Image: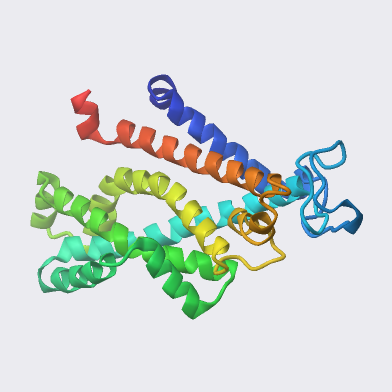
Amino acid sequence: MRALIAGKPLGALGGLVLAAMLAVAAGADVFAPYAYDEADMLARLRPSSASHWLGTDNLGRDLLSRVIYGARVSMLVGFGGVVTGLAGATVVGLVSGYFGGRLDMAVQRIVDAFMCFPLLLVALTIMALLGPGLGNVIAALGLVLAVRDSRVIRGAVFTVKQHPYVEAARALGVGHLRMIWRHVLPNIIAPIIILATVNLGAVILIEAALSFLGFGVPPPRPSWGGMLSGAGLMHMLRAPWLAFWPGVALSVAVFGANMLGDALRDVLDPRLRGSR
């Protein structure tokens, strides 16, 4: 942590941004001045004022409250999708990389088939089958990340398998399960952490794209991507704040995740440490 703060100030700033957004998302009921669905038709499309700091939308709902509750959705989807995806990727990568042979060949051909398509297209296809919803978005993004990141973890497992302590443990008769749990998995934690932070910004962006296209979290629950479409798109010229503030929140969240991910990669990757 000290190396991150001293050597990577942008990474530390990104971590601080994510921590602040997590706090806001967890305490949305406390920080939001209004409920996200509290409408006042007499205050429709009002600009910033003392009662509504970021203005109101086309139904008279407070935009600041909706941006704050939208942070809860983005953080839930971001961290839920990353945890789900990396759990699946770790299992697939460990099994494929450790056992190798025909099993590895079969698994990698499936991975190749998935990677032929863009990430967003696969997520859209899964959401079209499952339907919109918070849990479905997390499951779809987790499945996509699990397939894509399993190849990175498989490569890390191949590297660890070449180390002498693995050969020594195998010579002593250590079983496969104990070998994976005690000797392989602890030595690929650094790549997993790097993947988690790097993927967080991408997952938040994909969730926003899905919500923008109508496949994400359904209304009236607010999400930043959903706020950019619909009323935000329809009233862009008359009330630009409807799209501006959700866009700012989305940009800040992705900036924080990317800066933290880049910094952790530089700090935890021994090859990059050696080059410096």
Residue situated furthest top in the rendering: 6
Residue situated furthest right in the rendering: 42
Name the residue located 44 percent from the left edge and 63 percent from the top edge.
141
Find residue 84 and report its horizontal and vertical position in percent: 44, 61
Q: Which sits in the foreground, 163 or 93? A: 93
Quarter location, residue 175: bottom left
Q: Is residue 17 above or below residue 118?
A: above
Find residue 106 and report its horizontal and vertical position in percent: 17, 74
Name the residue located 69 percent from the left edge and 52 percent from the top edge.
69
Q: Quadrant of the image for the C terminus?
A: top left
Q: Which sits in the foreground, 254 or 213? A: 213
Left or right of 177? Residue 35 is: right
Find residue 81 and report its horizontal and vertical position in percent: 47, 59
The answer to whether residue 175 is seen in the rendering is: no
Find residue 4 and report its horizontal and vertical position in percent: 41, 27
Q: Is residue 2 above or below residue 161?
A: above
